[in-house]
Amino acid sequence: MPDTGSAAHTRPGEGATPLWLPREIFDSEHDMFRASVKRFVAEEMLPHYAAWEEAGIAPREIWAKAGAAGLLGTSIPADYGGAEAGFVYDSIVIEELANAGIAGPSFDLHSYIVAPFLIKFGTEAQKQRYLPGMADGSIIASVAMTEPDSGSDLQAVRTSAVRSSDGNGDHYVVNGSKIFITNGIVGDLCLLVAKTDPAKGARGVSLLLVDTNSPGYQKSKSLKKIGNKAQDTAVLYFDDMKVPVDNRLGGENEGWRLLMSGLVQERLIVAVRAVSTCEAALEQTIAYTKERKAFGQRVFDFQNTRFTLAELVTEVQIARHFMDRCIRLHAEGACDMRTAAMVKLSTTELQQKVLDACLQLHGGNGYMWEYWIARAWADARVHRIYAGTNEIMKELIGRTL
Ligand SMILES: Cc1cc2nc3c(=O)[nH]c(=O)nc-3n(C[C@H](O)[C@H](O)[C@H](O)COP(=O)(O)OP(=O)(O)OC[C@H]3O[C@@H](n4cnc5c(N)ncnc54)[C@H](O)[C@@H]3O)c2cc1C
């Protein structure tokens, strides 16, 4: 596996000349945390990563280790075992995973998508039950929205939750299925989107906290994907599965409002990963083309190579500034839906362009799975699809103009 632990913000092979402008959103405590995450990734993840990709899943132990190292609970309140440190710290974890080319297991979804729903909307009992385990990695979370017939159009979900009462108390009886569910195999807790009032469309949706060992909960084998191979992805089936009413997150039929509140962060997470991946790809490609020879000269010395890299480095530098502005805004609770859609759209489109060009500059080696650039190229493709497709981002931005 190519070395990914090199100084992320220094031009390879050129000593102290910085490739990127200094960033202004971090202080020395952030830098210390980043160093600890970088060390964890290098020692505990990279040596095993190829095996996890091969298996299509990462083992539970890595979750416990990541929890102990403080990677999972950056935003979880201290009362529930987290660091309560906020989105800048979340971003550091995501950036270091992206720099190293680690696309799975999906800490992103567990810590920065599911946990915030519990933090914002959970009852005290729900928080006590799930958040400490999510911070220490003993409870792994997934979120199940997408169905075989509804992805972008979430209002069309058909999984039903019908309220019922018997000797065991008030509960919902859930029937239906979900597809493409990240952490769907390893997950212990599934935040499930279900229709509690089908007549009301989006206004008839509720969120349920489902323990995945509930009778009636079934999962497929991990789906085979073109990238993100160390991340397990499943189809889920619910057959008369009982979920106690106490496990509902928020009010009945309030699910849509809750889901909307998570979209800004979900999109920023993808964008944070995209920009860091672009930076790492360019650093690696500059180094590679300076080593690789063709026609008696370095590949870097062809004008085509330098022009390509010059354009991409410039575009990524611009993207970095927009990204950091968004990280800071969001940490202050001030990033709006349009801005989040803009940063997700622009950075993931740029990522595709950068990775494809960098892969090209690696020649045939770039097509080999053992090369960082090949895996990053494959892993990145989904970023234009999930967290809202880029077409949906354009719709959202367009509507506000
Ligand atoms: C690896 C992976 C992991 C995932 N993890 C999860 C997960 O953990 N939980 C979960 O719930 N889901 C997950 N998803 C699902 C993901 O969120 C959806 O795939 C995504 O929202 C797109 O939905 P869809 O696949 O149904 O595509 P569709 O909605 O069928 O879209 C097909 C095409 O039509 C376009 N389109 C749709 N509507 C419009 C419109 N209004 N205007 C213009 N174009 C439009 C889309 O942009 C797309 O190009 C995952 C998907 C993948 C691939």
Image (cartoon, rainbow, N blue to C red):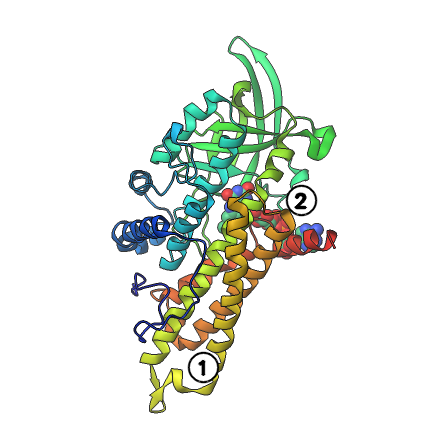
Image quadrant where one finds the C terminus: bottom right
Q: Which of 185 and 327 is in front in this view?
A: 327
Name the residue at 47% across, 67% down: 355
Instruction: Point out the residue furthest to the bottom here.
Output: 296
Q: Quadrant of residue 293?
A: bottom left
Asked if residue 253 shows in the view, the reply is: yes
Q: Which of marks 1 and 2 is nearer the N terminus?
A: 2
Q: Does the residue labelled 2 lie within 8 Å of ligand 1?
A: yes
Distance between mark 1 and mark 2 Cα atoms: 43 Å
Q: Would you name the residue on which mark 1 appears?
A: 306
Q: What residue type is labelled 1?
A: Arg
Name the residue at 51% across, 76% down: 311
Picture mark count: 2
Placement of 67 over or under 175, stated as above or below:
below
* Element at label 1: helix
Q: Left or right of 257: which side holds 185?
A: left
Placement of 248 over or under 30, stated as above or below:
above
Instruction: Point out the residue furthest to the top here.
Output: 167
* Element at label 2: loop
Q: Would you name the residue on which mark 2 appears?
A: 153
Counting from the top left corner in percent of width and height, residue 48 is at 28, 52
Q: Left or right of 342: which side holds 100?
A: left
Name the residue at 27% across, 49% down: 44
